[in-house]
Image: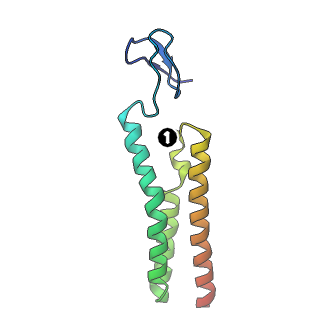
């Protein structure tokens, strides 16, 4: 259990969202410090843009066998780079973990199926 000082009265309280200070009534908000907010925003942008970029890359390079084979390791690296497990300390709730993990999993499974089908056509 992580503790923090209440910003209003300096009383020690839990850092969990929704915790109410027994001394002054201050409620811990979702983003208590700005570094978490920046990291969360960065991850959110990555979770939307990287699968879209990977899909576009595979589509554009599928016309040429050499560029297609070059793009596969790039897509696999981007899949690893955008993995929510790398950002697990950033999530506050189980709902967030499940939501971002599901979105990441579904989008990357679809991309991997697309790669598989295109590899099958190349052979």
Q: Position of residue 104 (x, y in %)?
A: 56, 58
Q: Quadrant of the N terminus?
A: top right
* Residue 64 or residue 17, whichever sits in front: 17
Give the answer, above or below, for where 17 lies relative to 71.
above
Point 51% across, 75% down: residue: 72
Q: Position of residue 60 (x, y in %)?
A: 44, 82
Q: Quadrant of residue 46?
A: bottom left
Q: Residue at x 61, y 67 (%)?
A: 109
Q: How many numbered discs?
A: 1
State the residue lying farthest toward the front. 25
Q: Is residue 92 above or below residue 74?
A: above
Residue in the image at 61% along x and 43% along y? 95
From this viewpoint, which residue is outermost toward the top?
23
The C terminus sits in image quarter = bottom right
Residue 7: image location, x then y, percent: 38, 18
**Residue that numbered label 1 is attached to:** 90
Secondary structure beneath disc 1? helix
Above or below, 98 against 21 in this view is below
| Image colouring | rainbow
Q: Residue at x 45, y 82 (%)?
A: 61
Q: Residues within 10 Å of mark 1 (few under 14, many from 20)?
A: some
Q: Which x, y percent locates residue 23?
A: 47, 8
User: Residue 45 sits in which quadrant?
Assistant: bottom left
């Amino acid at each position: 259990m992580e503790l923090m000082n209440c910003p209003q009265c300096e009383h020690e309280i839990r850092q969990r969202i929704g915790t109410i200070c027994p001394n002054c009534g201050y409620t811990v908000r979702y983003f208590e410090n700005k570094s978490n907010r920046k990291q969360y925003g960065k991850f959110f942008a990555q979770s939307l843009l990287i699968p879209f970029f990977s899909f576009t890359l595979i589509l554009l390079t599928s016309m040429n066998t050499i560029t297609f084979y070059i793009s596969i390791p790039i897509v696999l690296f981007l899949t690893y780079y955008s993995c929510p497990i790398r950002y697990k300390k950033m999530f506050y709730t189980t709902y967030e973990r499940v939501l971002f993990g599901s979105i990441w999993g579904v989008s990357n499974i679809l991309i991997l199926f697309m790669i598989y089908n295109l590899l099958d056509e190349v052979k």
